[in-house]
DNA sequence: AACGCGCCCTGTCCGC
DNA sequence: TGCGGACAGGGCGCGT
């Protein structure tokens, strides 16, 4: 479920709620989520450590435990919840991390696609450097975007979702950014002109920034650490709106499948160029 | 190397 | 109402 805005919202919530708290230990309900680490090693790696800070890298939630880092990726249906004493436990607990103050940091995941891992600070630093660039950071510029796309025959929509180059954009915000940039999702990434790369760069940043301000998009499962929904869903311009009128021109929004995932776009506002830069 | 696809898993919804 | 198939905010590992 969660893309950059949802993960950022979770991080900000956790920062407020658990900075300074100490993890008592880990009760692993579903060991597949921490594999190949064993439950005993996982517990030993985080038990009695104090949470010094919480940050985000790509779609990962990173808890700073001093020498160690606890890294959580929510994948599709993961939730990282802070339960107060007496709060009922939700339906699909996967890893319980009681805090010494009586609260519980609970990793909850219906589909169990999510992953939790622990690293030394150095090891996480090394892995973090190997990830793609942050779209809201200083490295992400129109020139860099065009450079990274210069050889790719992948469709723009699929390219945006590939975390090896630019991180954080998933299925919802890829469609939304392309609509805002008035670019066809089917264009080859390498056909972007300088002006188009500029529009796409601005659109990616704008939609992610606005979605963070609205605390993310809840379609179904997404919740912040307090269990609250995001508020961006009714501001989506194309995602999940197949057949409904485009908010700009009134034409029906179309749904196609790219790389096995749904893409939504306006066939009028996001028309492909007529002869330059052929499409696939 | 780059790309496309299947798969991991559970739940929900829609058509018959 | 039951049942099968499609689909769901992601990412990895495989084969080509």
Image (tube, coloured by chain):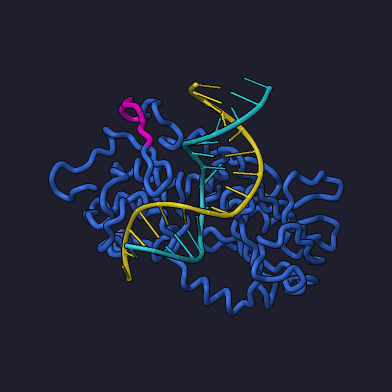
Chain colours: A blue, B yellow, C cyan
Going 55% across and 49% down the picture, which residue do you hit? A2
Going 54% across and 42% down the picture, which residue do you hit? A217
- Total count of labels: 0
User: Toward the viewer: B10 or A180?
Assistant: B10
Q: Quadrant of residue A145?
A: bottom left
Q: Is residue A252 magenta?
A: yes
* Left-right relation of A259 to C8: left
* Above or below, comparing residue A53 to residue A126 in the picture: above
Please name the predominant secondary structure of the magenta segment in the image.
loop
Q: In which quarter of the image is residue A239?
A: top left
Q: Which residue lies furthest to the left in this view?
A: A275
Going 43% across and 45% down the picture, which residue do you hit? A261
Q: Where is residue A210 in the image (x, y as percent from the top left)?
A: 48, 45
* Left-right relation of A140 to A229: left
* Left-right relation of A101 to A112: right
Q: Where is residue A102 in the image (x, y as percent from the top left)?
A: 86, 57
* Above or below, comparing residue A237 to residue B8 in the picture: above
Q: Position of residue A56 (x, y in %)?
A: 56, 61
The stretch in magenta equals A248-255
Q: Where is residue A279 in the image (x, y as percent from the top left)?
A: 22, 47
* Left-right relation of A182 to A55: left
Q: Quadrant of residue A139?
A: bottom left
Q: Is residue A43 magenta?
A: no
User: Toward the viewer: A156 or A83?
Assistant: A156
Going 39% across and 49% down the picture, which residue do you hit? A259
């Amino acid at each position: 479920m969660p893309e950059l805005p949802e993960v950022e919202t979770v991080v900000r919530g956790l920062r407020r709620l658990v900075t300074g708290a100490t993890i008592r230990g880990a009760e692993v309900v579903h060991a597949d989520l921490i594999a190949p680490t064993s439950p005993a090693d996982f517990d030993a790696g985080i038990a009695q450590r104090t949470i010094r800070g919480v940050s985000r890298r790509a779609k990962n939630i990173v808890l700073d435990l001093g020498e160690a880092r606890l890294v959580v990726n929510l994948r599709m249906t993961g939730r990282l919840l802070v339960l107060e004493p007496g709060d009922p436990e939700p339906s699909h607990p996967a890893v319980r991390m009681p805090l010494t103050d009586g609260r519980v940091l609970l990793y909850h995941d219906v589909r169990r696609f999510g992953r939790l891992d622990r690293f030394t600070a150095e090891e996480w630093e090394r892995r973090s450097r190997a990830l793609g660039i942050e779209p809201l950071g200083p490295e992400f510029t129109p020139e860099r975007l065009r450079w990274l796309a210069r050889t790719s025959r992948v469709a723009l929509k699929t390219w945006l979702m590939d975390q090896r180059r630019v991180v954080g954009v998933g299925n919802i915000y890829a469609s939304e950014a392309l609509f805002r940039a008035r670019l066809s999702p089917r264009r080859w990434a390498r056909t972007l002109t300088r002006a188009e790369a500029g529009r796409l760069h601005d659109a990616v940043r704008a939609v992610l920034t606005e979605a963070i301000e609205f605390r993310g998009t809840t379609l179904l499962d997404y919740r912040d650490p307090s269990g609250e929904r995001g508020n961006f869903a009714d501001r989506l311009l194309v995602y999940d709106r197949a057949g409904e009128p485009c908010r700009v021109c009134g034409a029906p929004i179309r749904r196609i499948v790219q790389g096995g995932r749904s893409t939504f776009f306006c066939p009028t506002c996001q028309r492909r160029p007529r002869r330059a830069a052929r499409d696939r």
